[in-house]
Every structure is written in C-alpha cells, then in structure tokens.
Amino acid sequence: MKTLYKRKSLQPYQEVFFCIFCTIILIVLSSYSTPKKLQVEKVLVESRENPMGINTLTPSFSWKLRSDAHDVLQTGYRIAIGTQPDLSKEHVILWDSDWVQSDQSLYLIYKGKPLQAGRSYYMRVSVRDNYGHTAISSIQRFHIGLLQGADWGDAKWITKDLLPDSLVNPLPLSSSKLRIDKSYDLPVFRKSVHLRKKLKSSIAYIAGLGHYELLLNGKNVDDAVLQPGWTKYDKEAYYVVYDLTKDWKQGKNTLAVLLGNGFYYIPPIKGRFQKHKVAFGLPKLKMKIVNTFTDGTEEIVVTDTGWKTHRSPITFSSMYGGEDYDANILPDNWPSADYDDSTWQSAVLTDGPSLQAQEIDPVRIMQYFVPKRTMGLTDGKRTVYDFGQNASGITTLTMKGNRGDTVRVYPAELLTEEGLPNQKHSGSPYYYQYIFDRDGQVEWRPRFTYYGFRYAEVQLRPSSSKPIKIVTIKAAHIRNAARQIGTFRSSDTLFNQIHELINWAIKSNMVSVFTDCPHREKLGWLEQLHLMGPSVHFNFDVERLFAKSLRDMRNSQTETGLVPEIAPEYVQFDWGGDMFRDSPEWGSSSILLAWYAYQWYGNKAFLTDNYDMMKKYISYLQRKAKDNILYQGLGDWYDLGPERPGVSQLTPAGITGTAIYYYDLTVLTEIAGILGDDAGQVKFDSLRHEVYQAFNKTFYDAKKSSYGTGSQTALSMALYMGLVDEKAQEQVFANLVQDVVSHDTSFTAGDIGHRYLLKVLQAHKRDDLIFAMHQDDTRPGYGYQIRKGATALTESWAALPNVSNNHFMLGHLMEWFHAGLGGLGQVEGSIGYKHVRIAPRLLGDIARCSVGFETPYGQISWKGDKGVYQLEIPVNSTCTMVLPLSKQYSINGKSLATYNYKTIADAVEITLGSGIYTIK
C-alpha cells in the first residue's frame, strides 16, 4: 500500500493540544451549520395553561416556540388529544390531526370525536420547523366544565335566609328610595364526608355568591381572594373548578364554606358607606364534587338540605363599607373535621342564576407593603401607618389582645391637615373591625372586601385596662393575577416614574372587572377599555379579561340596543337624565375593544362572539342620532377647562360622540368584511359616508380649517378618525399644533381626547411635542401629580384632593411609551403580532430605552443604548426594525447588505426573522 502522507511524530503533550484544537473546531462548525434545538415553550387551551373548567366542547389550541437559531419558522404541526396522559396508547386517542403543513400556531380548533362535559382530557402538540427539526410539547391537561344545568345533577342552591322577592333589585336607580330594613346574617356551611376507598381523582365545582372561601379539613383549597369574579348576576354567575385529589384523607373529612356579599348584595347598614342598593338576593352556595376511586366507582357530593349552616363570624361585609369579624360567634376550629355542628340548622333551598366556568385569572394578594413611617396620635389609642404606595388592597394584622377588645382600621388614600385618614371623597365611612374572643395573639385580614389606600389608622378599643398591641401590620395589594408581560425603561427618570404611576393605577383597578377606582365606586366604566386597553395589553396578559369585559357588555346591553356606560351594570345613575348611562364614547367599547383585541391576539372569537351586540348598538345609535349627529353623553370628561373638572368644557356636545360613531362604522365595515357579511358591509359603509357629511356640515369651519371650538380634542379626533378632507388635513393639523403651543406647549384634552391627541402627534412625527408636553411638572399633568406626592395616577390632571387619587382613565401616555417612544406595533395587515414593526422615536433625545412584550408568538424586545440596539424576535414571526438613516449599520458583525432592508426617506427598514441580534 502506497503511503500518500506520513505525519511527523508528535510529543504526547502535542497530541493532547491537537485533539483539543480539533474538538473546538468541530464544535464551532457545528454551531454555525445547524440551529439549536427547537422547543415548544408554552401550550394554551382556550388561552390558558392546563385549564380547569372551560366552557366549550370544541376548544382551541395555541403554542409558543423557542429556538436559539435565526429565521426559524414553523412549517407543520400535529395535535393529539386523548382521555389519558399516555398518548402513545392508540385506544385513548380522540383526535390525531396528523401532520398539517402550516405556520399557524394560534387558535387551532378541536376536530375530533365528541368531548363530554365534566371530563378531563390530555393533549400534546408536535411541531416542525424550516430546518427540519421536530419538537414535542409536554402533556397538557384540560378539564371541560359543566355546560348545562343538567350537568350539575342533584346539586342545589342553598342559603341560610331568603330575601323576599319584593326586595330583589338587580338594577336600582341611584335615587331609589327602596330600603331593606332587616339585617341578614352572612352564612357559613359545613358538610362531612367519609372516604373509605383509595381516591383516584376529585374534581370540585363551586359557585358561592357573592364570594366564597372553600376549606377542606380546615385548610383553604387555594390562595385566591374574592372568588368568583363578579358578573351581571341576573344573567349569569361564575363557578370555579378545583382538583382536590391530594387534599382528602381516609376517614372523616369536612368541607367548609364562608360566603361574602360582594356585588350580589349591598347590605344597607347605617353608619357605613353604600354607593348603591343592588340586591340580586342573599348569599348562596352551589357545589358538586365528583370523587372517583381506583376501583372505578364514583361518589358525588352535592349541596342540598343535608348541609349545615350557621351565622358567620363575619358580622358585616360590604364592597363599599368594609368588614367586621366577631371571633366570639364561632371557635377557630369550626371548619375542622372534629368540630361538633349538631346544633347548626339545615341549609335552606333557593334558586340562583345560570352558571359559567370562570376562565379569567383569579384575584390574589400580589404584594405586601410594610409601613414606611408611623404616626402616633395624642390619645395613645390611635396610630396612623403610611405604607408608601396607594394601591388596591386590604390590611393584614398580627395583634395581641384580650376577650372583648376591639381593633378598628380606617384605610385612606389621603390624610387631612391634622394627619388623619381622609375618606371624604373615596367613600366614607369604610373600615375593618375585629373583636377578640379570648386573650392572646391572632392573625386576621378581611376576606370579602377591599379599598384603595396608602394610609391606615388603627384604633385600639380595649374592654379593660389591659393593653392591645399591634405586632405587625401590612398593606396587602390585591388585583387580578394576570401576568405582567411587558416592560419599559428609559434614561429619562420622569418618564420611568410616570410609567410606574400609571401602572399602579392599572393594577389597582384590574380585578374581575376593569374598575374606575378601587374605593368609592369599583364599577366597570367602559370608555377606559378602548382608550386605555392599548396601554394595558402592552403590560399584562389580559386577553381573557378583555373577553370577559365584552361578555359583561353583552349581558348589560338593553333590549333597545343601548350598551350602558357601566358593565356589569349594577346601578342607573339618574342625575343628569341619561348622561351617565348613554355616552357613545363609553358604549363604543363594545365595538372598538373587540376590534383591537382581535388585532392584538389574533383570536377571531372577539369578532364572532360580539358581532350581534355591535350591530344592535349601531342600530341604537342610528335611531338616537339627529341628522346623523349624536349629542348625548359626557363628552370629553375631565378636560382642562376653567371650571371644576367633569363634563366636557372645551369641546361642544356632539363632536366626540359623533366622531366615535363614525369610527365605529369604519371599524364595523371592516369586521363585516372579515366575517363575510356582505350586506352588513355595504350598509355600514353607506351610513359611514352619511355621518361623514353630517359631521363636516355641522362642525367644520372652512375659513378657519377648524372643528367646533378648535379644541385639541375636536381637532385630534377629527384627524384620527379620518373625518378631515385630505386637502384640509395639513392646515387642521397645523391648527392643532398651534393650540398646543399657545397653551405653553401643554395639553387641555381630557379622558376621551387625550389619547387621540397623542396618536395624531405621533402619526405626524411630532413626538417632540409629546415629549415637551409631559416633561413639565409645574402644571397639571403626570409630572405634576408626582410632584404633589401621588403614587398612582389620579382622576384629575391636577391631582385634586376632592376626587379619586387612584384612577387609570387618563393614563394614555403609557401607550406612547411602548408604541411611540418604544416603537412597538405591527405592519399593516398583521394580526396577533405575526409581523412586528419597531420604529422607536426620539433616539437622539433619549440616550437609552428598552421595551419588552410577550406577543402571542413569544418575547419581542429591543434595547437601545447610545446607537447600539439589542433585538429579540420570537420564533415563527418576523420583525421590521426602523432606524435613522444616519450611519452604516452592521448586524451581528455582518454588513447590512447581507440582510433584507430598504431605505425610506430618512430611515432604514430592516426586516429580520426570529433570533437575537445586535445592530450597530
């Protein structure tokens, strides 16, 4: 054999280095030649992970992917659904989609054998990418709820007392004189169950109205509060599903339930605040538990007259008045299995609303605050605590006292000049109270109420000469447990503070309803959903909470088609006629929120579920219009005029309502086209043109190129909605800029107009004006509020002490932080952020800025620091990055010429696939 090459002999140490060198080369080459492993990061069923209780037999499936490689796209998927976790067994499979060649990863609808209510199922998704790699998800579980009344079997609604039909009042007028003179006790319930077999699974379905806490053998089954979420109770209520398999023990077990009033019943107690007099009935309970044993048999536990009930130690509970607890009524061990309930009365049967499984995130305690400072009062029995943050919540206390002692807590947003809690404008009196049943130390918190507060006054009321001691006190912030999925940070300290100010107002008003404030009203005023929804969606995972808000609107819509200003609607404020019930700027959330949510999440159900409501509402507005102009409603609420803030001062009646009406029709024309309603599309488009003509005929002054009084709101809304003729747009916008400048580069727009002012300035690339308007903290605005000590956004631009100091309706600048300064958006035609567009502004003025956001496809983020940009794009999506055309860029060390880009005017647009990039 001929030797072609003879290697020179190497020393042993040289052999080692040679092997290491070859290994390194192979690793490097391997890393460049093939992408990193593809992963299925998150699988959602009906937009939830492993959901317990969904309301459909044809669920949708979505997933997110992860890979460290670049330009990764899904090319196919395969979904398997079965009755058992081991999906390798063919006989358990109900649906195998087989491989489908598609990049679709959102809202794939089940198409297998019929599913059943009250059953758990298991699913797995396999995915292929454009590099030929396959990823398989972990097994996911989902449980279908009880979809019809018959699914509840023998379970009955039970209660302790019955409210006479004559006193049931599901929609009282604010001026209603109806009074409920009798005081009704809150109930607790018990039921003992004996387990004699080995348990395989235990699924519980519970509806407790207004709210409940469920305990098994003395322990809470979860850490949620204010369960279930509140609804329009004359239409429906929610139940919650639990897996209790690990909570039972062999032998005797005891189920125990406490109930609170919530919004189901507002108790009329003298000496406590009562915003309205809604009464759907008295607190009640319905429950079903299915215990399945390893031998295949089942035992079903239901609520019936076999349950025992007793007066609750919670002697008063109101969303508006606070909560009282008397420990003398029942011993601490009343929920335990060894407690003797033989003297308790049997539960009373009653009726109740139809039920839906709760699909929104629960409300939880999300954060604790300890006092930043303590102020003792001269009498020695009162202490005021400052927790440093105005937030929705309750107080939690550890205290030492003696039998008969009372501790009372008054929470408040503000203090009086004397340093006492000031509840005058946030709902007064509101307090928590605890009465000791014995000497010793206790831990206590109210269960079925909450308030917006920063301060708390604790009053000690001893029953003897022995002292009471507060060992610890904390403020427990409660809110909807939706994940925070967005971030914003910049080198501008004031902008960071403003973002935090708005964020706290959002968090404090995000429960099972988006409320106006967390104290005096706690009502779901609707205008903030379409005006602040864009800001909220950039920060929180609230797809299901938006869907619930739209469902509340459907349930609150009247027979005439009116969508009232509040949903769920618990009261009709009848001062000012219909002014506080019929404002198009409020009711239009029924159309605009659904449209926005469809674009944000890619879920077509936002359109199909709400289309009938939209059509009914537009028909209502058409009937209300006078020559196609809508004059009713509040207008640009809380604008900056010469008088005390309230109803619009600077913009004439009809402008904001009609502009929104026109925009509704524009959007509804698009929706009708998507849903294939050709006749509807023609009808809405025709009416849209009529409203356009009427609006300009009524409000446009051609000589001045202005609308109405020329207010910022009037001009901005006309421009944003497309109501300005193309030839006049430049001059109308110039007039808008002139108005801003004439007010010393400040804004005057209110609740309705401020967002549109920002959007129009951003669209015309006048972000410099937005910057200037919100940098001055010496005049009413965000910075001014912070300067006055606000820690959450207030109801008025001037942070007035006689209005709410925790309101999120004016927080529109947050959207600009993310979509303007941060540049986050979508290219035209993209749905669900499939193709992201990032076009940050003011890069020359803001040295550093970073924005992150979890889209339906995964994490999109960018960070800019003095001309260097870090960019992350999720798998199966695309991003177009728009940067100033001021230098030659490189991407991950490579020339821009190797990427897909184009120059437009003074910018460069770079289109990239998934991955992590450094652009210099």
Image: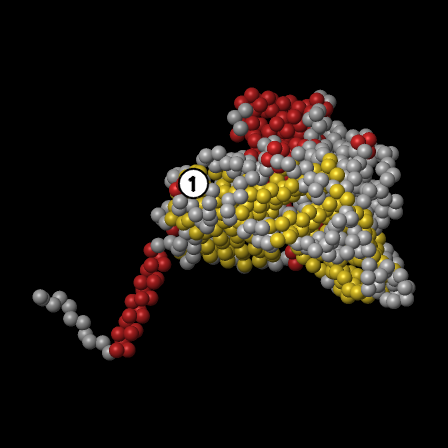
Foreground residue, 570 or 389? 570
Residue 174 seen: yes
**Residue 25 screen position, x and y as percent:** 31, 64
**Residue 450 screen position, x and y as percent:** 75, 50
Q: Amino acid at mark 1?
A: Ile
Q: Quadrant of residue 444?
A: bottom right
Please give the name of the residue rendered at 38% of the width and 39% of the height, measured from the top-left corner: 98
Please give the name of the residue rendered at 86% of the width and 66% of the height, measured from the top-left corner: 467
Quarter containing the N terminus:
bottom left
Looking at the image, residue 702 lies above or below residue 807: above
Which residue appears farthest toward the left when viewing the image? 1
Neighbour tally class for label 1: few under 14, some 14-19, many 20 plus, Cα within 10 Å:
many
Residue 793 seen: no
Report the side of 839 relative to 723 (left or right).
left
Q: Quadrant of residue 601?
A: top right
Colour mode?
Answer: secondary structure
Foreground residue, 479 or 876? 479
Report the side of 706 relative to 875 (left or right).
right
**Residue 217 screen position, x and y as percent:** 66, 54
Foreground residue, 637 or 259? 259
Please name the residue that numbered disc 1 is placed on: 93
Please give the name of the residue rendered at 67% of the width and 57% of the height, measured from the top-left corner: 367
**Residue 807 screen position, x and y as percent:** 73, 47
Q: Secondary structure at mark 1?
A: strand
Looking at the image, residue 120 lies above or below residue 669: below
Please give the name of the residue rendered at 40% of the width and 46% of the height, measured from the top-left corner: 88
Q: How many marks?
A: 1
